[in-house]
Amino acid sequence: MSRFWSDLVATLTPYTPGEQPRVEQLVKLNTNENPYPPSPAVITAIQAATGDGLRLYPDPEAAALKTAIAARCGLDAAQVFVGNGSDEVLAHTFCALLKHARPILFPDVTYSFYPVYCGLYGVDYRPVPLDEALRIDPEDYAGENGGVIFPNPNAPTGRLLPLDAVRRMLDLNPDSVVVVDEAYIDFGGESATALVPEYPNLLVIQTLSKSRSLAGLRVGFAFGQAPLIEGLERVKNSFNSYPLGWLAIAGAVAAMADEAYFERTRQAVIASRERLTAGLESMGFEVLPSAANFVFTHHPGRDASGLAGALRERRILVRHFRLPRIDQYLRISIGTDAQCSTLLEALAEILSVEP
Ligand code: PMP
């Protein structure tokens, strides 16, 4: 007879992140990192923070960072929560704000970490199928629930829910916390942070991992009215944890201050996305409209897993999900123009050979 804790562990399905290979010279378009380095001001700020100050514990409130972020969004510091990457912010959110007697709702298909958090924190959930064009329809989220969470743009589809539809989602769910995970919002969407003063049930989550090229620094935020932020702070404090170390705080403050660099690299990624989309379409791929730093695409005549394997043989990594409904799609992160050209040339070569 098995022991209860081994049964318990057996029910947990860990999250499998995208591959982070240790070999060099790969064209790595599988985990939606930014192809450009972080702002030089970030490196300078981190170097400046590596002195005697590291002897001291960091500010448990990360007040300098909260103030910098709040100012940028027109909110005040009590409406901002910070954590080690938005994944940690999401963990605290599931633990503090989405744990109810009723199931929470999220799209099917979406970020594959959500069901993992539900497993970890004992949150019941009901996946809501995307429509026939792989879009989120807010009308499908009406009715009693324990909370709603969705990425905007959605992952891995890249499809954007316009702000009026996000508003509709909030209006349909006045008694639930509605979490909008905006990991990719800077690549083409309008942020819901503007709605925070109006909706006490809205929590917006963002990250420096994508549009600020800082996946390795691990900084994420949540924006919401003070009671929701207070809930997150209580969970964090229960772990007796510091939100961020000094180096992350220094780098994040510098990243938020360099708007010119942010704008330049953001526009470069958007331009490459349009170029990559046109290139893929010219080869017969169908590409979903993307507001993110990746595209979601399939080729009517080719098996997606076979394509991913053939690319891998050429040292090009893209993401293929073995999931119902999307197993014929590839998710391709936007690289530099040179990386996108290498990918397009490889695909042309692969497609030129009969399947
Ligand atoms: N949300 C979504 C939708 C994501 O795709 C990711 C990145 N995998 C995250 C959150 C987490 O990003 P990070 O922890 O690097 O901020």
Image (cartoon, rainbow, N blue to C red):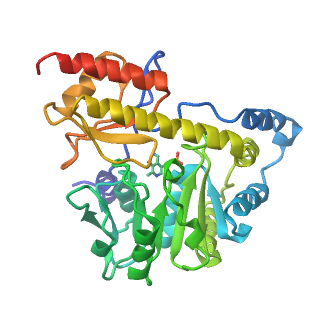
Residue nearest the viewer, comparing 337 with 6: 337
Looking at the image, the residue that sits furthest to the right is 52
Picture layout, residue 335 above or below residue 14 = above
Residue at 52 percent across and 60 percent down: it is 190
Q: Position of residue 220 (x, y in %)?
A: 59, 52
Judge left or right: residue 242 versus residue 298.
right
**Can I make out residue 235 in this image?**
no
Residue at 44 percent across and 84 percent down: it is 175
Q: Quadrant of the N terminus?
A: bottom left
Q: Quadrant of the C terminus?
A: top left
Q: Position of residue 140 (x, y in %)?
A: 27, 72
**Can I make out residue 302 in this image?**
yes
Residue nearest the viewer, comparing 346 with 25: 346
Q: Position of residue 334 (x, y in %)?
A: 44, 34
Judge left or right: residue 325 versus residue 199.
left
Picture layout, residue 257 above or below residue 235 = above
Residue at 46 percent across and 42 percent down: it is 293
Q: Position of residue 326 (x, y in %)?
A: 22, 46
Picture layout, residue 321 above or below residue 148 = above
Based on the displayed image, in which of its 4 quarters is residue 43 positioned? top right
Residue nearest the viewer, comparing 235 with 65: 65
Judge left or right: residue 61 versus residue 336.
right
Based on the displayed image, in which of its 4 quarters is residue 54 positioned? top right
Residue at 56 percent across and 73 percent down: it is 195
Number of numbered markers: 0
